[in-house]
Image (tube, rainbow, N blue to C red):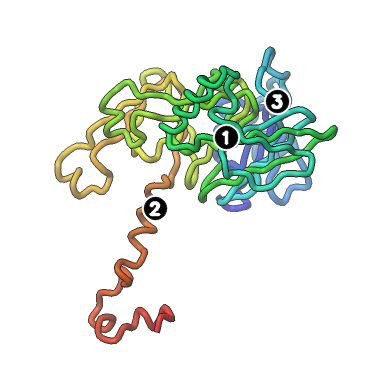
């Protein structure tokens, strides 16, 4: 996404973005924003209502303000503020009021201000205290998803606002997911969870279908986020969100699925002919998604990135390109690389 096509929106008291201009227009068409929704793009002097921006003014709805709706009644998770920085290698900075906390995967912290206290806990940090056996069960569930047995809680122990930031593990986007607006639950791929407001529960979701478990790319076990607070999920490359209508289906590469609402049915589908399977390069199965519900897709799965890096790496001391007669005879590839 170029800087000129980079937009930020203030929705629900939180910053959403960066998103493209086409995504802003899609939100305008769906009437999820209106003329009073604040927007900003690089080069603008400050936040401006969409109704005052010429390129959007003609199409934006004059509905009720969406910039700062009231807090969800009875919200149990801490109501944190945040800002996502960067474009391709992003990090999220969380602002905590006195007494507020955020939970994160071990090793994701980037920096924190002086008033933040850090505590490592055993098992799922966001779950209610269920004693030692409950913590042991929570740790076992996290182990099944490939995560660490421990999580870290960052608490503001000062009398003023403090900040803590968490970095993405590889190039991509950080998505802010307000579980209160998503029905209280989200299912996402393993290793995608980054951090969340204290009170969000991080568990596991078992696939009930053997085919999905064996061939669905993510196996039987995925991460389940539950609660009514903010959670942050990381995905590779560019992220595309789609709203599927009831009965609407979508076929996706199994590695490109980031997250979906539990109302979406997840199954697998055979690619097609033997020739397509062997030479098409798309694997044997697709992920078949059936609405209603929202799904999030990524353009660069970590497995695809790792395969490209591995294929380009030297094999037995030789580069993959070292195949020409001149290369074998005179070692020109090594000379160009500065190896000789």
Name the spot of residue 337 as percent of width and height, x first.
42, 78
C-alpha gap between disc 1 and disc 3: 20 Å
Quickly name the residue at label 3: 79
Q: Is residue 166 left or right of residue 297?
A: right
Residue placed most toward the observer, 280 or 114: 114
Marked residue nearer the N-terminal end (1 or 3)? 3
Marked residue nearer the N-terminal end (1 or 2)? 1
Few, some or many C-alpha atoms within 10 Å of disc 2 (few <14, some 14-19, many ≥20)?
Answer: few
Q: At 29% across and 74% down in the image, what residue appears?
A: 322
Quickly name the residue at label 2: 306
C-alpha gap between disc 1 and disc 2: 26 Å
Name the spot of residue 215 as percent of width and height, x first.
27, 34
291 is higher (above) or lower (below) than 276: above
Q: Is residue 294 visible?
A: no
Q: Is residue 270 left or right of residue 261?
A: left
Residue placed most toward the observer, 5 or 323: 323
Q: At 72% across and 34% down in the image, what residue appears?
A: 38
Marked residue nearer the N-terminal end (3 or 2)? 3
Residue extending farthest to the right is: 159
54 is higher (above) or lower (below) than 78: below
Q: At 23% across and 81% down in the image, what residue appears?
A: 325
Q: Is residue 150 visible?
A: yes
**Splitting the image into 4 quarters, where does residue 22 fall?**
top right
Few, some or many C-alpha atoms within 10 Å of disc 1 (few <14, some 14-19, many ≥20)?
Answer: many
What label sits on residue 151 in the rendered view? 1
What label sits on residue 102 in the rendered view? none
């Amino acid at each position: 996404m170029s800087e000129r096509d980079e937009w930020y929106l203030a929705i629900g008291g939180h910053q959403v973005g960066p998103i493209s201009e086409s995504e802003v227009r899609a939100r305008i068409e769906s009437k999820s924003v209106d003329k009073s929704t604040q927007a900003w793009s690089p080069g603008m002097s400050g936040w401006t209502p969409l109704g005052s921006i010429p390129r959007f003014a003609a199409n934006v709805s004059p509905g009720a303000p969406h910039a700062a709706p009231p807090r969800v009644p009875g919200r149990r998770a801490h109501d944190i503020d945040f800002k996502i920085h960067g474009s391709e290698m992003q990090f999220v900075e969380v602002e905590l009021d006195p007494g507020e906390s955020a939970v994160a995967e071990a090793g994701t912290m980037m920096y924190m201000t002086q008033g933040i206290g850090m505590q490592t806990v055993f098992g799922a940090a966001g779950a209610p205290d269920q004693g030692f056996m409950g913590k042991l069960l929570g740790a076992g569930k996290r182990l099944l998803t490939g995560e660490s047995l421990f999580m870290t809680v960052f608490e503001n122990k000062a009398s003023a606002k403090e900040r803590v930031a968490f970095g993405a593990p590889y190039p991509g986007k950080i998505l802010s997911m307000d579980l209160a607006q998503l029905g209280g639950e989200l299912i996402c791929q393993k290793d995608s969870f980054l951090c969340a407001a204290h009170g969000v529960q991080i568990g596991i979701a078992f696939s009930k279908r053997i085919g999905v478990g064996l061939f669905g790319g993510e196996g039987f076990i995925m991460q389940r986020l539950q609660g009514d607070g903010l959670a942050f999920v990381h995905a590779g490359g560019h992220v595309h969100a789609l709203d599927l209508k009831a009965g609407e289906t979508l076929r996706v590469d199994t590695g490109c699925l980031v997250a979906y609402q539990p109302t979406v049915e997840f199954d697998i589908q055979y690619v097609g002919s033997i020739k397509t399977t062997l030479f098409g390069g798309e694997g044997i199965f697709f992920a078949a998604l059936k609405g209603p519900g929202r799904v999030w897709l990524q353009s660069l799965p970590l497995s695809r990135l790792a395969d490209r890096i591995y294929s380009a790496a030297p094999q037995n001391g030789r580069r993959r390109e070292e195949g020409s007669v001149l290369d074998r005879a005179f070692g020109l590839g090594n000379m160009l690389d500065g190896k000789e």
